[in-house]
Image (cartoon, helix red, strand yellow):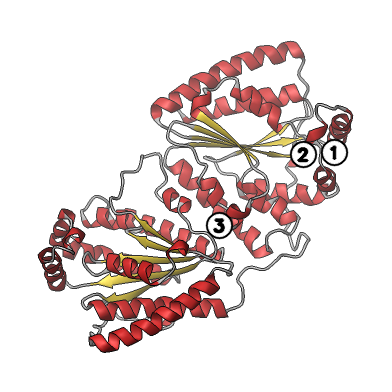
Amino acid sequence: MPEPEECTRVDWPPPPLKEPDKRSYKRRAGELRARLLELQRRLREADFPVLLVFGGVDGAGKHELANLLTEWLDPRDIRTLAYLQQRQLSPREPPLLPHWRDLPARGKLAIVLSGWYTPGLLARARGEIDAEQWAQRLAAIAEFERDLVADGALLLKVWMHLDAKAQRERLRSLLADPAQAWQVQPRDWGHLHLYEEFMAATEPLIAQSREAGLPWQPIDGRHPRARSLAVTEALADALEARLAAAPTTTAAKRGRGRQAAVPDRLAEVAQPALDKGEYRERLHAAQAALHRHSQRLRLQQRGLVLVFEGWDAGGKGGAIRRMLQALDARMLRVHRIGAPDARERAHHYLWRFATRMPAPGHIAIFDRSWYGRVLVERVEGLAPPARWQAAYAEINRFEQAWTAAGNRLLKFWLHITPDEQLARFEARREDPLKRWKLTDEDWRNRQRWEDYALAANTMLQRCHAPQAPWVLVGANNKRHARVTVIESLNTMLDNAD
């Protein structure tokens, strides 16, 4: 099969395939199956997932090929992501969020049917979106795919093609066979009547993928045996080449690496105090307003995400608890994020956060978040420089997709001075009820204060946006921090309405 870069030069539609006789097919199929089984065995030990994405014309063999691969290979390591019904997403749900949630783990293979291209392609063919909107959707998909590939995923996109006459004949032949008739749905005939519109919508899809460096491999879908051999050989070639290549991710060396000068926003954070009387009055008013906002968000079906970052012992937990007092526990989740477990490490780092994003009208509070990639993973050398440097743009796209759907996002950095942190550490060490909060890691992180400050300032500069802003909170005085957090959230929600 051609190498990926050659695919960008293939004429469209794909050239016809010659159907082999049954004897030749059986021999080649046996060889390919043995080859794929060995490659699947090697994939289990690899540090990347595989996504085999099918697109193309109804009746061109996509579902049969998915069944064939599941039959040939060990099904324990294959997952078919079949978005057959194209469920109606909430207007508040980012279109790519379900696909983030469904990403396969490293060492696994996912077969994607009617995936992230299909809703937009259908909408464009039906005239529900215009060319500019279709181009915007394709650009977002290209960024999504680039993020997956940059994280190490092997992405193979196969476009199964039939001309209009062949598609009509294929649908009729399937209907004539009782064992195959289930494959034909009423919508397939409707798509056939829009064949020319689908082809017109396909042209920018193919072009965009080529320009993004993630081209489709076009396959003629007329002959079952020929297309089966072509697709399975393409998968085997891609897997073999990738397994033979050098790893795309390597352990990073400890250190900051080169870093352009960034403004020291942390040095500008004021540290006002607040007496108990004023604190109680402002806290009560702020909590009442927050409760009203939460009810409005529920009625509007808007999700709310709150991110808390900051120094160890900075008071994140105390601020969150005061916020919870004003909210309906049935409508929210607090996620305390620590080091990823084995299952989370086997996925793209954003996967464990995509699976925790709230439903429409609900609230998610993250005590530590996806910013660990550009904070602790950067400073401690847990991510290669190329990966944490790429994470700023990935995070911005992740957040932008959330807010573009009408949801709300606010991020807090709770800032304390080194002297205040030391005082809190020592107080925790002496208090038997708080001693459990203090770990060796806290002391170790304190020794790298300057490195973490540089990482935080870079994050604040590169990941601040009007719809997903950072709020810097002076937290030396806990009462001031707790009130400021809730009042800042109320201000954001007032302005958003």
Relative to 52, residue 298 above or below: above
Q: Secondary structure at mark 1?
A: helix
Instruction: Report the amino acid beneath label 1.
Output: Pro
Relative to 361, residue 15 above or below: below
Q: Secondary structure at mark 3?
A: loop
Label 2 crowd bin: few (<14), some (14–19), many (20+), radius 10 Å? many
Instruction: Report the amino acid beneath label 3.
Output: His
Label 1 crowd bin: few (<14), some (14–19), many (20+), radius 10 Å? few
Question: Does the CB distance between marks 3 and 1 fall below 8 Å?
Answer: no
- For label 3, the residue is 347
For marks 2 and 3, give the one nearer the viewer: 3
- For label 2, the residue is 312
Q: Earlier in the sequence, mark 3 or mark 1?
A: 3
Instruction: Report the amino acid beneath label 2.
Output: Asp
Question: Label 2, label 3: how many angstroms apart (C-alpha)?
Answer: 27 Å
User: Is 381 on the left or on the right of 1, as rendered?
Assistant: right
| Pick the front one: 466 or 391 | 391
Question: Label 3, label 1: how many angstroms apart (C-alpha)?
Answer: 35 Å
- Residue 49: percent from left, percent from top: 51, 65
Q: Residue at x 69, y 13 (%)?
A: 280
Question: Label 2, label 1: how many angstroms apart (C-alpha)?
Answer: 10 Å
Q: Earlier in the sequence, mark 2 or mark 1?
A: 2
For marks 3 and 1, give the one nearer the viewer: 3
User: Is 263 on the left or on the right of 410, as rendered?
Assistant: right
User: Is 27 on the left or on the right of 34, as rendered?
Assistant: left
Asked whether residue 208 appears in the rendered view, the answer is: no
Q: Which image quadrant is residue 439 in?
A: top right
| Pick the front one: 372 or 460 | 372
- Residue 374: percent from left, percent from top: 67, 52
- Residue 310: percent from left, percent from top: 72, 39
Q: Secondary structure at mark 2?
A: loop
- For label 1, the residue is 418
